[in-house]
């Protein structure tokens, strides 16, 4: 399940970080953009970690995702 969570984190982290950076830019907080934009991106990647774990757990629990051996 960890491998699935890492793959999901890469995709979800990019989406959440991009959303956070867009929110910072849209809110006008970027007056100190050298600090606000990287912090928003980092926060997005950190927030995506537990989310990706929960999504991976749901995928692993789904009975329709079982492999046929």
Image (spheres, rainbow, N blue to C red):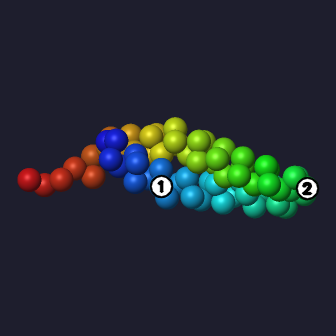
In front of the other: 15 or 31: 31
- Secondary structure state at the residue bearing disc 1: helix
Q: Is residue 29 left or right of residue 41?
A: right
* 23 relative to 53, above or below: below
In front of the other: 6 or 58: 6
- Picture coordinates of residue 11 (x, y %)? 49, 58
What is the residue that sits farthest to the left in this orientation? Answer: 69
- Picture coordinates of residue 41 (x, y %)? 67, 52
What is the residue that sits farthest to the front in this orientation? Answer: 34
Would residue 58 be seen by someone viewing this image from the given angle?
no
Figure quadrant of the N terminus: top left
Q: Which residue is mark 2?
A: 31
Would residue 68 be seen by someone viewing this image from the given angle?
yes
- Mark 1 is surrounded, within 10 Å at the Cα level, by few (under 14), some (14 to 19) or many (20 or more) other residues, namely some
Comparing marks 1 and 2, which lies closer to the viewer?
A: 2
Q: Which residue is mark 1?
A: 10
Among the 4 quarters of the image, the one containing residue 14: bottom right
**Which residue is at a point 38% across and 40% down the rendered structure image?**
57
Label whose residue precedes the other's in the sequence (1 or 2): 1
**Which residue is at a point 66% across and 60% down the rendered structure image?**
18
- Mark 2 is surrounded, within 10 Å at the Cα level, by few (under 14), some (14 to 19) or many (20 or more) other residues, namely few
- Picture coordinates of residue 32 (x, y %)? 87, 52
- Secondary structure state at the residue bearing disc 2: helix
**Which residue is at a point 47% across and 55% down the rendered structure image?**
10
Q: Which mark is residue 22?
A: none
Query: How many discs appear?
Result: 2
Gap in angstroms between the C-alphas marked 1 and 2: 29 Å
In front of the other: 45 or 64: 45
């Amino acid at each position: 399940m960890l491998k699935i969570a890492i793959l999901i984190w890469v995709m979800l982290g990019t989406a959440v970080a991009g959303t956070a950076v867009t929110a910072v830019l849209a809110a006008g907080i970027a007056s100190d953009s050298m600090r606000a934009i990287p912090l928003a991106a980092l926060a997005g990647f950190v927030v995506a970690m537990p989310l990706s774990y929960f999504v991976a757990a749901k995928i692993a629990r789904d009975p329709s995702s079982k492999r046929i051996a």
